[in-house]
Image (cartoon, rainbow, N blue to C red):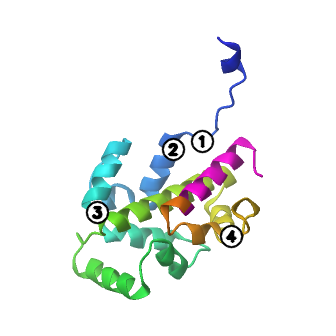
């Protein structure tokens, strides 16, 4: 073993456990059409569009974050959300667009990482909904509307996992 390997810090959270938690948050096997065992399968599913039921499942399971905040983070207007929700009630196979699906997956991924890092979904939702010093006192949920903002939130969570908060 090399000296550098002996001192390497490894995160306590593995990516496979994040993937499994995201699948669960989005409804698991009953909602998602097939097993998602790697990132290419996730990409393909997102490209085809996640079922609207996945979004509704995630929203139903939220404890602290409110639906309007999440809808805004996904780049949807409240009216568009209501139309999508009605479509899902009429057609069980209704899907989101690739862009909406991508944002939903990223939101669930960040919520899953925050849940693993902070110990519970309730703690994760509280953290996402409160201003954070490492994000220039912005609420993480407000940054999730853009790819750049999502990357900032994800980077901060990874730093917290490694114990480098500031």
Q: Is residue 150 left or right of residue 135?
A: left
Q: Which mark is residue 17?
A: 2
Residue at mark 4 to residue at mark 2: CA–CA distance:
28 Å
In the picture as drawn, the residue positioned furthest to the top comes out as 1
Instruction: Tell me the residue that label 4 is attached to.
Output: 138
- Up-down: is 151 above or below 58? above
Residue 110 in the image, given as x and y percentages of width and height: 54, 57
Q: Quadrant of the N terminus?
A: top right
Q: Are marks 4 and 3 in contact (CB under 8 Å)?
A: no
Q: Position of residue 53 (x, y in %)?
A: 34, 70
Please give the name of the residue rendered at 24% of the width and 72% of the height, measured from the top-left corner.
92
Query: Is the residue marked by circle 2 packed among few (<14), some (14-19), or many (20+) residues within 10 Å?
Result: few
- The image shows residue 164 at horizontal and vertical percentages of 75, 45
Camera sees residue 26: no
The first of marks 3 and 1 along the sequence is 1
Q: Estimate the x, y position of residue 142 in percent, counting from the top left.
A: 59, 72
Work out how far the residue at label 1 is from the one at label 2, CA to CA, in angstroms: 7 Å
Quadrant position of residue 135:
bottom right
For marks 4 and 2, the one nearer the N-term is 2
Which residue bears the numbered disc 1?
Answer: 13
Q: Which residue is mark 3?
A: 49
């Amino acid at each position: 073993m090399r000296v550098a390997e002996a001192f390497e810090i490894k995160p306590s959270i593995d990516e496979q456990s994040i993937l499994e938690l995201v699948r669960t948050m989005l409804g698991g096997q009953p909602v998602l059409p097939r097993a998602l065992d790697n990132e290419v399968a996730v990409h393909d599913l997102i490209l085809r569009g996640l079922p609207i039921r996945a979004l509704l499942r995630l929203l139903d399971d939220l404890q602290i974050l409110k639906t309007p905040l999440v809808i805004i983070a996904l780049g949807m207007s409240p009216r568009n959300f209501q139309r999508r929700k009605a479509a899902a009630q009429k057609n069980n196979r209704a899907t989101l667009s690739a862009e909406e699906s991508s944002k939903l997956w990223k939101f669930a991924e960040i919520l899953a990482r925050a849940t693993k890092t902070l110990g519970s979904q309730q703690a994760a939702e509280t953290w996402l909904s409160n201003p954070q010093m490492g994000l220039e006192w912005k609420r993480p949920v407000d940054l999730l509307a853009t790819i750049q903002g999502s990357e900032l939130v994800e980077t901060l969570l990874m730093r917290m996992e490694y114990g480098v908060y500031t």
